[in-house]
Amino acid sequence: MSLFSSIRDSFTQLTVALDQVTPDEYVQPSQNLSNATIGQHTRHIIEMYQCLLGGYAEGVVCYDHRKRDIAIETNKELAKRLLVDIASGSEQPNKELELKAIYGDATAEELKVNTNYYRELAYNLEHTIHHMALIKVGLKELNKVQVSETFGVASSTTRHR
């Protein structure tokens, strides 16, 4: 399975789960997620990809500067549309990128790391799976949503089982 098809597959699984959640459940704080919501985790997934795609043209990505758009975490239909947009817009040629980040407190220096588009897509896919695992915890609280056994599980773990 290609990187792009793996991203599409993960987004499809997430969309199927979101289709089973009411708008109220999408924004309902989950005790098992330290009162975070399914919507907040979904927004986080989306904004990481948006950040990567937004930095592609100039060749610079800084995940620290993502928008944190509350509309995505409160409107599941918007989130689903954005997942479709990202899946179709992510199929770009590989190219060198510079990753900028600040690790540490506000006085820490900005770090610059050489990377490439496909490496960052792979990172985002792994990050997506991690957040889907967290979303799955929130979904279990609802006790009604059906997801596949591989929802939120890394493909290496699935192969190992």
Image (spheres, rainbow, N blue to C red):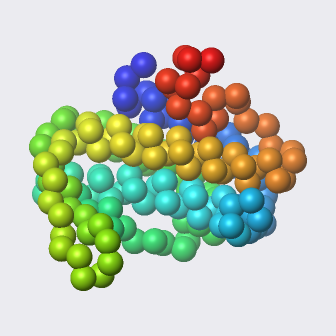
Question: Which residue is drawn at the image coordinates 79% and 37% (left, top)?
Answer: 146
From this view, report whether residue 24 is shown above or below residue 83.
Answer: below
Q: Position of residue 126 (x, y in %)?
A: 44, 40
Q: Residue furthest right?
A: 143
- Image side of residue 9 versus residue 96, left or right: right
- Image side of residue 115 versus residue 15, left or right: left
Question: Which residue is drawn at the image coordinates 35% and 37% (left, top)?
Answer: 122
Let me know if residue 135 appears in the view: yes
Q: Position of residue 101 (x, y in %)?
A: 25, 64
| Foreground residue among 69 and 128 | 128
Q: Position of residue 114 (x, y in %)?
A: 13, 48
- Image side of residue 29 versus residue 88, left or right: right
Q: Residue furthest bottom?
A: 107
- Image side of residue 65 versus residue 20, left or right: left
Residue 116 appears in which quarter of the rendering? Answer: top left
Residue 120 appears in which quarter of the rendering? Answer: top left
Q: Position of residue 111 (x, y in %)?
A: 18, 64
Let me know if residue 15 appears in the view: no
Question: Which residue is drawn at the image coordinates 59% and 33% (left, top)?
Answer: 153
| Foreground residue among 120 and 160 | 160
